[in-house]
Image: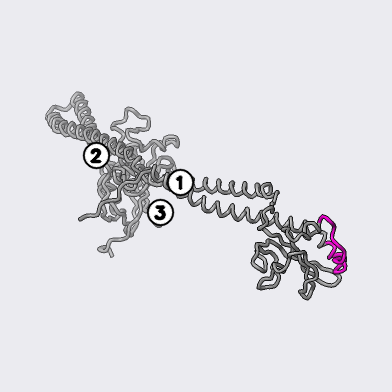
């Protein structure tokens, strides 16, 4: 039993799910960051408060050494440390680590030691009590003394008044970083959700260039699928209209060909004269117009490419051989130059040959009598083959080189025979083969049409 295709997803559901997941992740990460930020702020404020409370003790120890501890502390500082029921404690250790002085109730929580000696910052006393404190080393005349100042955080009236004011900066910074992160996440989400639409746009650009003729709705959100279906429906209607036009043109051209051939045959039976010649020219022009109608119907189809490999040099020589007599009768011979080694190209040789014949016909029609038309194959880039058709006519103005390959373009000469489909058909054929066509100036006057086609590996039979 074939496996069912994945159901189309909903763009709305993807957006809601993405925002929900992003919000949860942002809440978890943001909560952790805010917690760490506030914890850091609390520690900074707590450290500032402890150092401010013990400043007199630290300064006296640093200036007078152990002798400065013999005098009582000022009443304000003494009230902070001398109350056994209070929250602040301190202890002073000499260079040997012996206790020199301590506040009431400081022991057994202090001193707080860690694996590497005295703890520089701690949240628990030696006896397991909730003592938040720090250690400061003070250089004295008797050597380095260590002072630990701590606060019992279990005391109900412990309040850090400046936390809110100090924390506002880090919290705002975190909120700004969170907003920027959410904005970046939304941008990434939009980019990811628009990928199917961009893929559909690229498919639309390739329609008519050898790619599939309809847009695929695979992996597209259900909200976009009605638009894709409407576009494909419009393309279906356009194809039906074009098919009807092609069929009508082909039927009319085929119906007119036989009567025109009969007319030409009847005219050949009439006596030669000015009137007969005028009638023959008119019928010939009408027959050429019918041929152009058939060519227009053929040009409306995509040029066939195929997977065959052929020698482009041999095809160029064959095109010059076939069209050479016609050009010679009009007094414009064809000078052909081809490489000695084969130049292999992948595609449909008949289509490329038709493009070359159209370019030769265009060059012959624009060259003055007696001027040769050059069909040559100069050395191009390593990955492409180059064919040039050069004439010595009036050339193509730069302003018209962008429009010369449009259908029905005839260089402003409305009296010239034909529908102006030749160059348009050439451009379609070359583009279908993965190449490009350019027009430039010929040395000594005239135009040069250059066909660039990708080369292909030599076939095995040619080795």
Sequence-earlier tag: 1 or 3? 1
**Position in image of residue 231 (x %, y %):** 31, 37
Per the model, the C-alpha gap separating discs 2 and 3 is: 31 Å
**Relative to the observer, which residue lies in front, 279 or 141?**
141
Disc assigned to residue 298: 2
- The answer to whether residue 300 is visible is yes
Residues under labels 1 and 3: Cα distance? 55 Å
Q: Which residues are magenta?
A: 59-76
Q: Position of residue 82 (x, y in %)?
A: 78, 60
For label 3, the residue is 380
Dot 2 surroundings within 10 Å: few (below 14), some, or many (20 or more)? Answer: some
Near-viewer residue (149 or 224): 149
Please tell me which of labels 2 and 3 falls first in the chain: 2
Q: Is residue 84 magenta?
A: no
Q: Secondary structure at mark 2?
A: helix
Quadrant of the frame with the C terminus: bottom left
Q: Quadrant of residue 69?
A: bottom right
SS assignment at label 3: loop
Q: Nearer the viewer, residue 135 or 324?
A: 135
Majority SS type along the magenta span: helix
Residue placed under numbered mark 1 in the picture: 19
Q: Residues within 10 Å of mark 1 (few under 14, many from 20)?
A: some
Q: Locate residue 223 relative to residue 236 in the image: left or right.
A: right
- Of marks 1 and 3, the one in the foreground: 1
Q: Work out how far the residue at label 2 is from the one at label 1, CA to CA, in angstroms.
A: 54 Å
In the image as oriented, which residue stretches furthest toward the bottom? 96
Q: Is residue 64 highlighted in magenta? A: yes
Name the front one of labels 2 and 1. Answer: 1
């Amino acid at each position: 039993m074939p496996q069912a295709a994945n159901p189309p997803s909903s763009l709305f559901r993807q957006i809601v799910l993405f925002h929900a997941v992003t919000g949860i992740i942002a809440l978890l990460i943001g909560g952790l960051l805010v917690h760490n930020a506030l914890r850091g702020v609390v520690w900074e404020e707590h450290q500032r408060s402890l150092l401010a409370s013990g400043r007199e003790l630290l300064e006296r120890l640093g200036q007078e050494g152990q002798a400065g501890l013999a005098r009582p502390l000022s009443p304000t500082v003494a009230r902070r440390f001398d109350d056994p029921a209070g929250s602040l404690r301190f202890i002073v250790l000499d260079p040997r680590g012996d206790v020199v002085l301590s506040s009431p109730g400081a022991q057994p929580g202090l001193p707080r030691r860690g694996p590497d000696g005295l703890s520089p910052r701690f949240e628990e006393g030696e006896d397991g009590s909730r003592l938040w404190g720090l250690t400061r080393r003070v250089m004295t005349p008797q050597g380095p003394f260590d002072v630990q100042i701590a606060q019992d955080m279990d005391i109900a009236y412990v309040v850090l008044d400046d936390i809110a004011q100090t924390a506002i900066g880090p919290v705002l910074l975190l909120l700004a970083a969170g907003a920027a992160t959410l904005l970046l996440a939304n941008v990434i989400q939009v980019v990811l959700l628009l990928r199917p639409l961009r893929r559909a746009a690229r498919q639309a650009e390739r329609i008519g260039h050898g790619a599939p003729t309809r847009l695929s709705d695979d992996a597209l959100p259900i909200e976009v699928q009605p638009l894709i279906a409407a576009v494909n429906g419009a393309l279906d209607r356009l194809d039906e209209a074009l098919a009807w036009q092609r069929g009508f043109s082909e039927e009319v051209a085929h119906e007119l060909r036989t009567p025109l051939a009969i007319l030409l045959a009847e005219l050949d039976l009439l006596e030669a004269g000015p009137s007969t010649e005028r009638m023959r020219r008119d019928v010939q022009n009408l027959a050429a117009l019918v041929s152009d109608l058939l060519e227009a119907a053929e040009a409306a189809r995509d040029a066939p490419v195929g997977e065959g490999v052929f020698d482009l040099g041999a095809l160029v020589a064959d095109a010059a051989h076939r069209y050479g007599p016609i050009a010679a009768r009009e007094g414009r011979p064809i000078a052909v130059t081809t490489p000695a080694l084969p130049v292999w190209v992948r595609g449909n040789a008949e289509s490329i040959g038709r493009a070359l014949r159209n370019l030769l016909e265009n060059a012959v029609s624009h060259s003055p009598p007696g001027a040769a038309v050059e069909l040559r194959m100069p050395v191009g880039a390593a990955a492409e083959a180059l064919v040039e058709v050069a004439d010595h006519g009036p050339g193509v103005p730069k302003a018209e080189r962008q429009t010369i390959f449009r259908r029905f373009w005839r260089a402003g000469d409305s009296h010239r025979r034909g529908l102006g489909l030749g160059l348009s058909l050439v451009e379609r054929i070359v583009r279908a083969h993965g190449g490009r066509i350019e027009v430039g100036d010929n040395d000594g006057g005239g135009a040069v049409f250059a066909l660039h086609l990708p080369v292909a590996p030599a076939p095995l039979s040619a080795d």
